[in-house]
Image (cartoon, grey):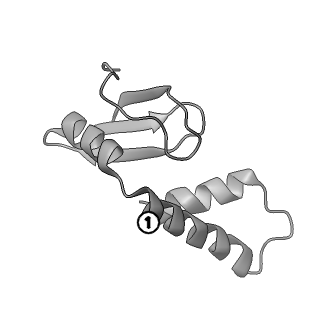
Amino acid sequence: MTDKTDLLPCPFCGGEKIVDVYIRDGREVKCTSCGGSVHAFQPDASAQARLKWNTRNTKQFVEQACEAVDEVFNNGNYVSVNRFDIKRAIRDKFK
């Protein structure tokens, strides 16, 4: 984990517990409160992940997340959709 002083708060929950952690072949910057994250891979993964986190287009990001939620409910398999299904759909949208 690296210093987080230059990372902005989370655009989803406003959380300020933002971490920069190692992932295979790269770095992930994420909110420890809600799990919102961005990934970057080598070369210069840490700087790229931090740049993506701090310069993300929040409005576009939220619109894409809403589309992912719509997909969960529009696929016809929503008999027992829970928050984990919605989180998975949002994460899949941003891979």
- Foreground: 73 or 60? 60
Does residue 72 sit above or below 87 in this rendering? below
The residue positioned 28% from the left and 41% from the top of the image is 49
Q: Amino acid at mark 1?
A: Gln
The residue positioned 50% from the left and 68% from the top of the image is 64
Q: Locate residue 48, reporting x and y percent.
A: 22, 43
Tell me which corner region of the image, top left, top right, bottom left or bottom right, holds residue 78.
Answer: bottom right
- Foreground: 30 or 89? 30
Does residue 7 sit above or below 76 in this rendering? above
Q: Residue furthest left?
A: 43
Does residue 53 sit above or below 1 in this rendering? below
Tell me how many marks there are: 1
**Residue 24, visible in the rendered structure:** no
Q: Is residue 3 left or right of residue 42?
A: right
**Residue 59, visible in the rendered structure:** yes
Secondary structure category for the residue under label 1:
helix
The residue positioned 69% from the left and 58% from the top of the image is 85
Q: Locate residue 53, reporting x and y percent.
A: 35, 44
Quadrant housing the C terminus? bottom left
Quadrant housing the N terminus? top left
The residue positioned 30% from the left and 37% from the top of the image is 27
Q: Is residue 2 left or right of residue 94?
A: left
Residue that carries the numbered disc 1 in the rendered image: 60
Q: Residue furthest right?
A: 79
Q: Locate residue 34, reporting x and y percent.
A: 60, 39
Q: Is residue 91 left or right of residue 39?
A: right
Near mark 1 (Cα within 10 A), the count class, few <14, some 14-19 or many ≥20, is few
